[in-house]
Image: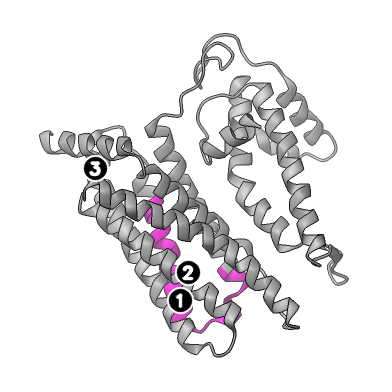
Amino acid sequence: MKWYFKVLKQYADFGGRVRRREYWFFVLFNIIAAIVAMAVDIAAGWELTVDRSTGLPNYGPCYLTYVAAILLPGLAVSVRRLHDIGKNGWWLFISLIPLVGGIWLIVLFCTDGQDGENRYGANPKQSEPRFTGRREEKSIAIAFIMGAIVSVVGFLFNSIRYDLFTVILLILLCVLMLLFGALYYPARDAGKTAARRNIAFGSLAVAALISAVLRLSALSLLRGYVAIILTQYVWILHHLALLALAVLLLLKSGRKSLRLASCLAIAFSALSIVVPLAKWYMLLANGHTSSFNPWDVIPSIAAILLGARYLSGKAVAEDELTTEGSRAS
């Protein structure tokens, strides 16, 4: 089980290496977790059905949420497993070769890692790989970038529900998230990293503000749907907590304030994943038709990762050192 949680901790860490044991234990517990999520859907009455028009299965919200949430760490650990045998992550695409591609990839995943150090790092059998602050920051940046991309896909599928002005704001929101991820990605020079971070936190603050305003405007149009109104309130609090964290980081605030904002960002981001599931169930139980889209899962997880990063005093101290380095340069 520890291997599974280790992979989740390194949520979008595509650097370094993992041994066979870590990879296959993650695969095992990942399958178990997916089965549990599907069982919860069936127990709640969200049974698996097949769309007659497309022939594709319609999965329940718990399973879809889990699949969306585990997408990035699953890809990341697969890339690190390929690194262990000296191959880059692009080898994942051999699975697209009909018939033999998938078998070939499984064989690579079963191959023992290279002895000693290779270009991707030290042998994980000989030394415990460290998930350093720099790699953690890269993971957060990648999570925000992927969250923005996934959100764009979700908006494209649901664009007919929005007016032109709302669509423009949603696109701007995705661009700002993408900008934050790109700028938060650590540069080699400490001075450049600090300068980029200021713009990154500013873009995140604007994105969170736009999201809160959109949710408030949607809330004003709702009447009588308790489940939907509750979801909107949770999302507003989620974005406001993220706004507070971004502003405090931009102002280089004290540790206590950052810890409080980080705790709030983590709590409301987690609720923004759980509450839509409850809303789905309440609407169906009352006979209302409702759709469920897991598009917001990855952005919420990215916010949780960001909050967790600044929950510890160590992260704050590292940022202070980075700021001092930029001033000295």
Which quadrant does the N terminus fall into? top right
Residue receiving disc 2: 235
Alpha carbon distance from label 3 to label 1: 32 Å
Seen at 53% across and 41% down, the residue is 11
Counting other residues with Cα less than 10 Å from the Cα at mark 2, is it few (<14), some (14-19), or many (20 or more)? many
- Residue 70 in the magenta stretch? The answer is no
Question: Which secondary structure class fits the magenta region best?
Answer: helix
Magenta-colored span = 155-181
Q: Position of residue 139 (x, y in %)?
A: 46, 40
Question: Can you see residue 216?
Answer: yes
Numbered tag placed on residue 167 in the rendering: none
Residue receiving disc 3: 194
The numbered mark, 3 or 1, whose residue comes first in the sequence reads 3
* Whether label 2 touches label 1, CB < 8 Å: yes
Alpha carbon distance from label 2 to label 1: 7 Å
- Amino acid type for the residue under numbered disc 3: Ala
Foreground mark, 3 or 1, reads: 1
Which quadrant does the C terminus fall into? top left
| 317 sits to left or right of 240 | left
Foreground mark, 2 or 3, reads: 2
The numbered mark, 2 or 3, whose residue comes first in the sequence reads 3
- Amino acid type for the residue under numbered disc 1: Arg
Name the quadrant containing residue 78: top right
Q: Residue furthest left?
A: 328
* Whether label 2 touches label 3, CB < 8 Å: no
Numbered tag placed on residue 215 in the rendering: 1
Seen at 57% across and 76% down, the residue is 159
| 82 sits to left or right of 106 | left
- Residue 179 in the magenta stretch? The answer is yes
Q: So how many labels did they put on this image?
A: 3
Counting other residues with Cα less than 10 Å from the Cα at mark 1, is it few (<14), some (14-19), or many (20 or more)? many
